[in-house]
Image (cartoon, rainbow, N blue to C red):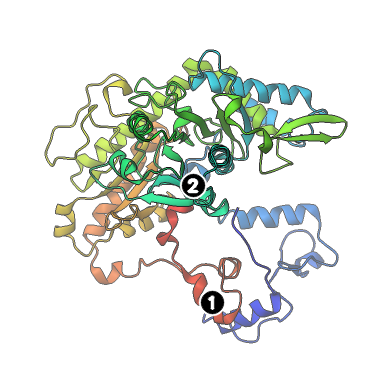
């Protein structure tokens, strides 16, 4: 959740008075709503935005007021930037509404809900290949970010315990990750004082963690390697098994045992079900994989607010990290960063698992991949785009070749490269030469005018000269919607080709709202420049 700073209404008004779109001499009491709803008297009442109002307002008036303001948001179903699910069945929604008030921290009060939580852990552990004789242990979290912190902290503590027992220094822990890592992985390193060894990615490594660089950067202080099952940039799965083998060889050579944590925020609910799986082994079938996380609110098909982390055996979760809570008459073991947490999402996750079953999940995930392949082929067929993602290419083929016949003979995902249902694409070199005045950002902006949210952002450091547009093909993006999306993209591209450079100059990043400016730095006048960072410079960190 983003940090927000206190807003002084009087200071904000002074700022607004200087803005060219506002007349000087505006009311000094604070930015306020006036509403046409309710009575004539109520219509003249000002509702303060930044200070609690003295008397409040009628419920129906406030409801309508907020509803109208929220109409300014994008439409969730057309937010093609996000991995987070925006659709659930009516029965699942009903279960969530009926259980909205239940708190996961009240274990004794809600035993049935806690049983469902335990069943989810067991089901997911089996999906991820927990081995016979191992006692998997895990927990629901608020999302993958919390889960990654918990997994990383467990690796750090295990490393510290081993080093301390051997009488070795524990002051310089480091962790390996690719430059394509989602910001939560970097946050773990910063918050828990671990050196983040962020390795550059390249076209040759398919914009993912390069095993050869892993080999060159590990040492006795490496607490573990974060391997991502589904890069948020391009959807590529990182080569877990290949990195596993490198770490095996390193241990034989040095005696240093380095574990793997798999960040399967998106892939954790895709790879187990699809025919392509993850290409090679990625889960608890590999002994060095000690923990895995995923987001239930992504391809687990639940609304935002639930993630999962599982350790292959309870021996890999240090005992001193587990809290024994005595609360409301009961005793509970807990390893989370939060205390109170919503329980409705856990119930919804269990609903999905038992309602859809293995074959239901497989059908949905295979369908999303098929739709993503269709969109990828259509984009490349125009000649204007090349796809950086590879799920539409024949298994083993990772290169775009101009004029090459597209492969479309596979009946399911097994015939294609494994990956997330993500379409990452960029303008071709030929198009850029022919239309140098057309900037890729304009494609994103014009599609935004049609209500599609499709981000345009640079690839990770070392490849940042290449900008990509990215579409996440979720369950709710139907074949009909893809057909319309392709039509609209073609229409936008034709419009851009016939528009001169002067007109295109108008499509520049807009200034942030005054609320956003004040909430995200620049609260005081001398700091105001800090709040002007264009969204496109960091959109990747905001849309994952």
**Residue at the (52%, 13%) spot, across then down:** 132
Horizontal and vertical percent position of residue 55: 85, 64
Query: Residue lying furthest bottom in this view?
Result: 25
Instruction: Please determine whether, in this image, residue 434 is positioned above or below residue 93.
Output: below
Residue carrying label 1: 528
Query: Residue lying furthest right in this view?
Result: 329
Instruction: Please determine whether, in this image, residue 500 is positioned above or below residue 326.
Output: below
Instruction: Please determine whether, in this image, residue 67 is positioned above or below residue 265.
Output: below
Q: Nearer the viewer, residue 136 or 443?
A: 136
* 360 sits left or right of 26 in the view: left
**Residue at the (53%, 16%) spot, across then down:** 357
Quote the CA–CA distance across marks 1 and 2.
29 Å
Horizontal and vertical percent position of residue 210: 30, 41
Using the rendered image of the protein, determine whether residue 354 is visible from the camera's viewpoint: yes
**Residue at the (62%, 58%) spot, across then down:** 69
Badge 1 density bin: few <14, some 14–19, many ≥20, Cα 10 Å: some
Mark closest to the chain's N terminus, 1 or 2: 2
Res 162 → quadrant? top right
Badge 2 density bin: few <14, some 14–19, many ≥20, Cα 10 Å: many
Horizontal and vertical percent position of residue 532: 48, 71
Query: Residue lying furthest top in this view?
Result: 132
Residue carrying label 2: 185
Horizontal and vertical percent position of residue 125: 55, 22
């Amino acid at each position: 959740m983003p940090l927000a700073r206190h807003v002084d209404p009087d200071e904000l008004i002074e700022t607004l008075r200087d803005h060219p779109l506002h007349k000087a001499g505006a009311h000094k009491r604070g930015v306020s709503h006036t509403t046409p709803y309710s009575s004539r008297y109520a219509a003249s009442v000002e509702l303060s935005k930044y200070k609690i109002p003295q008397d409040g307002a009628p419920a129906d008036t406030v409801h309508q007021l907020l509803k109208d303001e929220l109409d300014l948001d994008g439409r969730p179903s057309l937010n093609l930037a996000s991995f987070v699910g925006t659709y659930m069945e009516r029965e699942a929604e009903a279960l969530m509404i009926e259980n909205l008030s239940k708190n996961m921290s009240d274990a004794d009060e809600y035993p049935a809900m806690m049983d469902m939580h335990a069943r989810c852990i067991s089901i997911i552990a089996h999906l991820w290949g927990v081995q016979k004789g191992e006692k998997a242990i895990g927990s629901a979290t608020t999302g993958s970010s919390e889960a990654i912190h918990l997994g990383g902290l467990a690796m750090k503590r295990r490393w510290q315990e081993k080093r301390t027992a051997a009488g070795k220094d524990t002051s310089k822990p480091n962790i390996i990750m690719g430059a394509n890592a989602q910001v939560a992985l970097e946050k773990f390193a910063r918050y828990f004082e671990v050196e983040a060894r962020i390795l550059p990615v390249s076209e040759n490594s398919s914009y993912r963690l390069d095993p050869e660089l892993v080999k060159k950067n590990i040492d006795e202080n490496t607490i573990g390697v974060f391997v991502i099952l589904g890069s948020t940039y391009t959807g590529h799965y990182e080569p877990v098994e290949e990195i596993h083998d490198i770490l095996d060889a390193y241990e034989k050579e040095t005696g240093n045992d380095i574990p793997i944590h798999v960040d399967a925020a998106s892939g954790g609910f895709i790879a187990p079900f699809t025919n392509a799986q993850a290409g090679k082994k990625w889960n608890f079938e590999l002994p060095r994989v000690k923990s895995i996380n995923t987001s239930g609110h992504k391809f687990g098909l639940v609304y935002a607010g639930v993630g999962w982390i599982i350790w292959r055996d309870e021996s890999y979760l240090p005992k001193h990290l587990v809290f024994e809570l005595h609360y409301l008459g009961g005793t509970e073991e807990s390893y989370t960063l939060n205390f109170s947490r919503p329980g409705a999402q856990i119930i919804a996750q269990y609903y999905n698992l038992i309602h859809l079953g293995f074959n239901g999940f497989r059908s949905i995930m295979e369908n999303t991949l098929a739709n993503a392949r269709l969109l990828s082929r259509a984009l490349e067929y125009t000649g204007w785009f090349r796809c950086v993602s590879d799920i539409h290419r024949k298994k083993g083929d990772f290169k775009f070749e101009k004029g090459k016949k597209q492969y479309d003979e596979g009946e399911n995902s097994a015939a294609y490269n494994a990956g997330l249902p993500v379409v990452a694409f960029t303008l071709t070199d030929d198009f850029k030469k022919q239309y140098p005045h057309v900037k890729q950002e304009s494609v994103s902006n014009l599609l935004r005018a049609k209500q599609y949210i499709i981000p345009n952002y640079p690839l990770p450091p070392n490849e940042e000269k290449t900008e990509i547009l990215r579409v996440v093909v979720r369950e709710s993006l139907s074949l009909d919607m893809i057909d319309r999306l392709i039509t609209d993209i073609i229409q936008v591209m034709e419009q851009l080709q016939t528009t001169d450079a002067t007109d295109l100059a108008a499509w520049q990043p807009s200034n942030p709202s005054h609320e956003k400016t004040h909430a995200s730095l620049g609260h005081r006048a001398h700091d105001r420049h800090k709040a002007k960072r264009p969204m496109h410079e960091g959109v990747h960190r905001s849309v994952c």
